[in-house]
Image: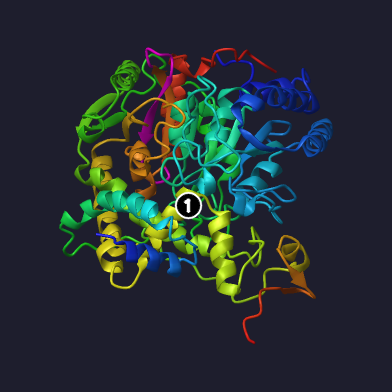
């Protein structure tokens, strides 16, 4: 059932010596060269470095010292530091910045033997839901180049959806992995807060930022997550807990092959199935729930009454943290410095005004306001209190079920330019995704169908903290019984 | 409700130049965003402990020892202006 170009399938072919890492890497570089003019998914392609890494992977395979992902070409979102390569965050501020070290997750994937072919485009500083706010121009959706791929990790999502690479990293602060995964018809996993270290992830909102994988299948997400998860003392919020083997947790047949999800209780929050959801999206999600029931799962109604407040809470907390984190960009130690200024204060103001785009500036201003004297209690503290109400809703709901399901995004991919002038309209895209960040819960988007217009739809699953293995298992069993994840965008053939 | 003066004040606090011509447009967008945020004011949060960490975890402390080697040359290689290992900024004391 698996197509020949998933990570799992490529590893088998590498193991069987049917293909070399150098061949896979050259093929990936060729596909990128052909497609990137349209998609604009990559901002940096490191051909020389990739081929050196591929040769090293082939040599390690020949010696028997290869890591578990040796020879698999992947891409990293350009918010993750990659030693010696540009790390721009999609911003003019960092357009000439070269990372002096690797992020923890980049290091982990390097150690596993992956071949880094390039860095992917993104909304500036990961603030956005369409990848239109990049200083390097918008990313286009492989399913329809007139439409956005979602965001902020739109470059990584488009690269995997267009089969340029089999896997990529993203970061998810309010849905930035799951929403683009849904809009491009691939899998995206936001792990539990603290499972994957944020070391080397250029900070946007530190209490929400979460690195995670993109791939076409749940099995491939498990393979990537195995290399990305782990304790890291350099991130004080990294959790020290025994390492799991996500891939192994998917291996082997279920106890009851006819009903592999027997016993699984899926909670359906009434708030995720109400008004404001595109009819085709709702139909595809209903179809996925039917399929999960046929696999043995039962569905139970749950309620998340405070979840309607997730967007206002998020748009206090995320800008507050952003205004603090982005104060480091002052034109002194790194990043853009204005060419002309009067004094030090003027240099800060002009460097920041020139270096940041409109949405980043808005969030810095909102954050500065909500943290300013006289407003802190009314906004920031209030948001932290409502955040707890939302977390308590999920805790209660997850006491009555094992996973919570619903649509990832209320609509399929929208047209470029449709929402880029209206920040509030753009923010409402995140209505179903921000709660997982506010609560730290793991959540995953998997392809579950198409609109009548042929645009992909994503099903979102949440589990309890550190329930990644459960999410991956549900997604894997669903993918063994369905073929939505095998569909390729028009004109995208099978490669590799 | 956020005012034009607020926009100028927070732009100054944020060390972000917002020109006189930009204030009106920036104000319009921020007012819309605060329209969304202000829904929170109606929520009764009496007695609710603010949530600072999603796992309510206590951050660990590490030993107070040097863990990083001296890499100032590498780190300063990306700086806009340096001299003799120092970052250069406009003169602040006349």
Q: Name the spot of residue A230 as percent of width and height, x first.
A: 56, 50
Q: Which residue is pictured at 64% across the width and 61% down the height?
A: A337
Left or right for A261, reference A348: left
Q: Secondary structure at mark 1?
A: helix
Pick whichever, A56 or A247, lies toward us.
Answer: A56
Identify the residue at the far bottom of this view. B94
Q: Which residues are magenta?
A: A451-466
Q: Name the spot of residue A33 as percent of width and height, x first.
A: 72, 26
Instruction: Give residue A418's quadrant in the image.
Output: top left
Instruction: Give the residue pinned by disc 1.
Output: A360
Left or right for B62, reference A382: right
In the image, residue A243 sits, relative to residue A366, either above or below, namely above
Left or right for A448, reference A311: right
Q: Chain of mark 1?
A: A
Q: Which residue is pictured at 75% across the width and 67% down the height?
A: B71
Q: Which residue is pictured at 50% across the width and 32% down the height?
A: A249
Quadrant containing the C terminus of chain A in the rendered view: top right
Residue B43 seen in this snapshot = no
Q: How many marks?
A: 1
Residue A361 seen in this snapshot = yes
């Amino acid at each position: 059932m698996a197509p020949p170009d998933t990570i799992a399938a490529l590893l088998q072919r590498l193991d069987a010596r049917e293909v070399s890492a150098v061949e896979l890497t050259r093929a990936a570089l060729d596909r990128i060269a052909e497609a990137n003019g349209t998609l604009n998914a990559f901002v940096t392609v490191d051909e020389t470095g990739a081929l050196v890494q591929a040769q090293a992977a082939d040599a390690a395979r020949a010696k028997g010292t290869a890591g578990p992902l040796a020879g698999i070409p992947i891409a990293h979102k350009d918010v993750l530091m990659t030693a010696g390569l540009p790390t721009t965050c999609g911003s003019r501020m960092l357009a000439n910045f070269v990372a002096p070290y690797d992020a923890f997750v980049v290091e982990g994937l390097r150690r596993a033997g992956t071949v880094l072919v390039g860095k992917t485009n993104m909304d500036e500083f990961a603030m956005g839901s369409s990848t239109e706010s990049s200083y390097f121009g918008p990313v286009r959706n492989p399913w329809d180049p007139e439409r956005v791929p979602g965001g902020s990790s739109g470059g990584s999502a488009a690269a995997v959806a267009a089969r340029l690479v089999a896997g990529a990293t993203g970061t998810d602060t309010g849905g930035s992995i799951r929403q683009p995964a849904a809009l491009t018809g691939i899998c995206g996993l936001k792990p539990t807060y603290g499972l994957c270290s944020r070391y080397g992830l250029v900070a946007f909102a530190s209490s929400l930022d979460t690195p995670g994988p993109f791939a076409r299948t749940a099995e491939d997400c498990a393979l990537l997550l195995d290399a990305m998860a782990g304790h890291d003392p350099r991130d004080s919020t990294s959790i020290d807990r025994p390492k799991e083997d996500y891939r192994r947790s998917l291996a082997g047949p279920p106890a009851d092959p006819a009903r592999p999800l027997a016993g699984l209780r899926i909670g359906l929050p009434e708030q995720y199935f109400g008004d404001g959801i595109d009819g085709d999206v709702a139909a595809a999600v209903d179809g996925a729930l039917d399929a999960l029931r046929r696999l043995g799962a039962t569905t139970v109604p749950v309620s998340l009454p405070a979840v309607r407040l997730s967007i206002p809470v998020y748009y206090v907390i995320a800008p507050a943290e952003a205004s603090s984190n982005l104060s480091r960009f002052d034109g002194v130690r790194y990043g853009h410095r204005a060419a002309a200024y009067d004094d030090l204060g003027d240099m800060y103001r002009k460097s920041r005004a020139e270096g940041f785009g409109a949405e980043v500036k808005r969030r810095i201003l909102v954050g500065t306001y909500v943290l300013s004297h006289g407003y802190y209690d009314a906004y920031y503290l209030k948001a932290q209190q409502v955040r707890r109400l939302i977390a308590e809703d999920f805790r209660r709901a997850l006491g009555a079920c094992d996973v919570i399901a619903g649509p990832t995004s209320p609509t399929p991919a929208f047209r470029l330019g449709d929402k880029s002038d209206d920040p509030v309209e753009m923010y409402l895209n995140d209505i179903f995704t921000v709660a997982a960040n506010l609560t730290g819960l793991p959540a995953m988007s998997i392809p579950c169908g198409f609109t009548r217009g042929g645009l992909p739809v994503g099903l979102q699953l949440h589990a309890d903290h550190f329930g990644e293995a459960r999410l991956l298992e549900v997604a894997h069993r669903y993918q063994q019984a369905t073929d939505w994840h095998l569909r390729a965008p028009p004109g995208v053939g099978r490669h590799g | 409700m956020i005012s034009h003066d607020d926009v100028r004040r927070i732009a100054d606090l944020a060390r972000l130049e917002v020109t006189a011509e930009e204030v009106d447009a920036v104000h319009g967008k921020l007012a819309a965003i605060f329209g969304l945020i202000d829904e929170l004011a109606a929520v009764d949060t009496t007695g609710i402990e603010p949530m600072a960490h999603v796992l309510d975890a206590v951050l660990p402390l590490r030993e107070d020892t040097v863990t990083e080697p001296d890499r100032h040359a590498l780190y300063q290689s990306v700086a806009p202006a340096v001299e003799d290992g120092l970052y250069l900024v406009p003169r602040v004391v006349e």
